[in-house]
Every structure is written in C-alpha cells, then in structure tokens.
C-alpha cells in the first residue's frame, strides 16, 4: 500500500462520496473536483476544488496534484481528458468513456463484439422519427445520444400526434430510437478488472426501474443460472476488449431465452450498492483497488439483500429496521426524482 498517494475524482455526488470513503479507509488522500459547494463528497474528501468541467485550465491544475484520476459520471468532455492524459493516469480509460457517452456509438460497439442490444435507429431529423413510426407500426422510445440518465432525455412516441406535440416545445438533439422491449426482467452485472487483466464479477442483481429510475436491486435474482452466466460472460468480454481498469456496470434486458445489453457505465453503478452490505467486498473498494494496482478482493455474496433507493425523500419505514443499512447522501436540496440515499436490507443467505 502507498497511503500517501492521492486519488482525484471528477464529480462530487454520492458515487464520489462512497468511493472517497472506501479510499480513505485504505489511507489514500481524496481530492474532488466538482461545481457544487454542497456536494455529498465534500463530507469525506481531503480536498475540494470547485469549478466547472468545461474550465479546462482548472481541471488540468487539479489533475496535476493527483496520482490517479477517476470519475463518477460519464458525461465529461473527453477533449479535456485527452489533455489530462498527458499528465496523469486516467482510470478507467478515455476509450471506455467515449463509447459509453454516446448511445449510438455504444450500441454499435457492442454489436461489433457480437453482443445483442435492443433494435436501434439513428435519428437526426424529426422526419426520421415520422418515417420510422410508419415503417415499424409500433411505439418507439426516443433517447438522446448524449447526457441522458435516470430516464432523462427519453420520450415515448406512439403516434404522429405525439411527435408534433413534443416538437412544438422541444428541439431534437442527435438521438436514437429504440423499439420497446417487452422484457421479463432487468439484470445488471458489476464487474472489476485490474491492469494485469484479473477480472472479478459480482453475482448479477435483479433491478426494478420506475420511470427510468432504479428503484430496487434484489439478490439473489431468480433468473435461471444459464442466463446469469451469459450476462457475466458478456460483461467479461466487454472489459477484456477495452483493456479496462476499474469497476463497470453492465445493464441487461432479459426476455425468455434472450439477453440484450441495455447500457454500460464505465464507473461504479447504483445497481451495485447492494455490495456494500451483501458481499465480502463492495464495488467501491474494488474500484479503488483496481485503479491503485492493489489486489482485488473476493466478490462472493454472503447475504441476501434488497437495495432500496430513496428517491425524492430521506425517510422510509425501513430506516429503523434492525437489518437495514442506511446511507443518506447529504444532498441539501430534495427534489422529486433526485436520489437522496439508499437502504440495504439484508437477510441471512438463503433464509
Ligand atoms: P436507460 O437510460 O436506457 O438505461 O433506460 C432506463 C430504463 O428505462 C431501463 O432500465 C428500462 O427500465 C427502461 N427502458 C429503456 N429502454 C427501453 C426499451 N427499449 N424498452 C423498454 N424499456 C426500456
């Protein structure tokens, strides 16, 4: 261990806070760069640097003072990071970030590896949507190629009237349209890979989303073992191909015997929060270990667990449950679709 080393994190939200906690447990210093003075990570960081992500000079100055740079969200200008790469080691790599920032690039990349995604179409003009609706004769989900998360940037289009109404008020950014998948369930795999190519995967968790936002992750999932294995194999293929270092979240749709990747996140992921209490290691510890070249830990699950997101609230009837592990992120402002915390409700494995 080299506890005197400093890790820089771009972003100061809850993921950065939990990464910072895991890093400080190992004695590392944590420097955070983010625009928000009240951000959750400020509660645990050694040093905060406030600035916007487009202020490249400030970001470069920040990066000069850290040994390794990582990030908690994908929507960072990769041009700025290319500058930074000359002075500091960035983990996970910019390549993974570039692919995952653009849904169209991401799906083409996955298909090029022989991995199935939902059927998707490139949308540059409103007329592309009109034509597609006529051609497919079924509803489509319009998603912005960039900057969409937690269901943001998504519109369900069922009729030509929906198109007219939506674009009376809104402009069309570069987008994709997806066919709606009538999936049976959603699964995700949290995977970690180190510089030497060692890979560990957590058991796939089953996710429930409402209005595009993750509500619960449950372990174990009753999904058939063969499909869980397929999900894990796909996640392994992706991190190996990218020569990836760190934790990645891979989200899947499952339908009968078929499995599609919905999206990849080159970072720790909300659907991996259960690992904090259900497994011998957490996704946050694993990410810090991978990026700091420390040996990876066991990803074995020791408890059954349901992770409940606290969305738009900081209370729940679960908070006082004897087996509830409560995490409140410390965000100053509560708003209806904002993730304010989460609860891991654990149970003895198999009970
Ligand atoms: P995304 O931002 O693409 O991860 O979408 C958020 C959530 O919306 C997913 O986890 C699904 O629950 C739902 N969703 C996204 N795309 C589709 C689709 N093509 N068909 C059905 N549901 C979808």
Image (cartoon, rainbow, N blue to C red):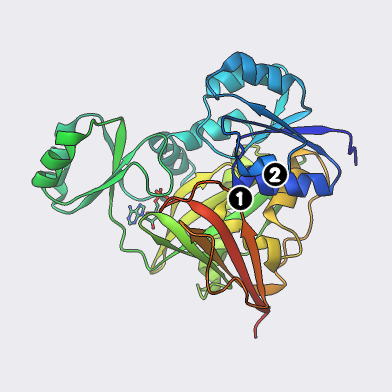
Q: Cβ(mark 1) to ligand 1 < 8 Å? A: no
The residue lying toward the viewer, choosing from 192 and 144, is 144
Image quarter (top left, top right, bottom left or bottom right) of the N terminus:
top right
Q: Residue furthest bottom?
A: 351
Which residue in the protein does label 1 denote? Answer: 330
Direction from residue 282 to residue 75 in the image, left or right: left
Q: Compared to 15, does 94 lie above or below?
A: above
Position of residue 348 measured from the top left corner of the image (x, y, whole percent): 69, 80
Q: Which mark is residue 43?
A: 2
Q: Quadrant of residue 173?
A: top left
Position of residue 201 measured from the top left corner of the image (x, y, whole percent): 66, 57
Q: Residues within 10 Å of mark 2 (few under 14, many from 20)?
A: some
Direction from residue 87 to residue 174 in the image, left or right: left
Whether residue 196 is visible to the viewer of this picture, yes or no, is yes
The residue lying toward the viewer, choosing from 228 and 32, is 32
Q: Residue at x 55, y 46 (%)?
A: 332
Asked if the residue at tag 2 contacts the one at tag 1, i.e. Cβ–Cβ closer than 8 Å, the answer is yes
Q: How many marks?
A: 2
Q: Secondary structure at mark 1?
A: loop
Direction from residue 169 to residue 260 in the image, left or right: right
Q: Residue at x 55, y 24 (%)?
A: 52
Position of residue 134 measured from the top left corner of the image (x, y, whole percent): 10, 45
Q: CA distance from mark 1 to mark 2?
A: 8 Å
The residue lying toward the viewer, choosing from 50 and 73, is 50
């Amino acid at each position: 261990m080299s506890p005197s080393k400093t890790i820089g994190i771009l972003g100061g939200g809850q993921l950065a806070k939990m990464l910072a906690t895991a890093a400080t447990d190992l004695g590392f210093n944590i420097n955070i760069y983010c625009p928000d003075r009240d951000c959750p990570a400020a509660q645990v960081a050694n040093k905060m640097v406030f600035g916007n992500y487009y202020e490249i000079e400030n970001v470069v100055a920040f990066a000069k003072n850290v040994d390794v740079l990582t990030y908690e969200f994908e929507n960072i200008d990769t041009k700025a990071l290319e500058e930074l790469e000359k002075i500091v080691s960035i983990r996970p790599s910019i390549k993974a970030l570039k692919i995952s920032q653009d849904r169209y690039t991401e799906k083409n990349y996955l298909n090029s590896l022989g991995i199935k995604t939902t059927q998707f179409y490139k949308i540059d003009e409103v007329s592309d949507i009109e034509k597609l609706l006529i051609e497919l004769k079924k509803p489509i989900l319009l998603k912005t190629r960039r900057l969409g998360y937690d269901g943001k940037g998504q519109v369900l289009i069922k009729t030509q009237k929906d198109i007219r109404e939506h674009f009376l008020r809104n402009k069309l950014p570069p987008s994709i349209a997806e066919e709606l998948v009538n999936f049976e369930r959603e699964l995700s795999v949290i995977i970690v890979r180190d510089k030497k190519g060692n890979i560990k995967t957590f058991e796939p968790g089953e996710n429930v989303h409402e209005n595009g936002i993750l509500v619960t992750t449950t372990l174990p999932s009753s999904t058939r073992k063969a499909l869980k294995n397929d999900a894990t194999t796909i996640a392994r293929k992706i991190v190996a191909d990218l020569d990836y270092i760190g934790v990645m979240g891979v989200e899947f749709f499952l339908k009968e015997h078929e499995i599609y990747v919905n999206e990849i996140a080159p970072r720790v992921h909300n659907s991996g929060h259960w690992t904090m209490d259900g497994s011998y290691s957490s996704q946050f510890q694993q990410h810090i270990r991978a990026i700091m070249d420390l040996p990876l830990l066991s990803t074995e699950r020791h408890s059954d667990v349901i992770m409940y997101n606290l969305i738009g609230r900081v209370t729940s009837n679960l908070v006082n449950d004897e087996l509830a592990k409560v995490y409140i992120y410390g965000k100053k402002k509560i708003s209806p679709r904002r993730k304010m915390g989460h609860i891991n409700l654990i149970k003895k494995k198999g009970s």
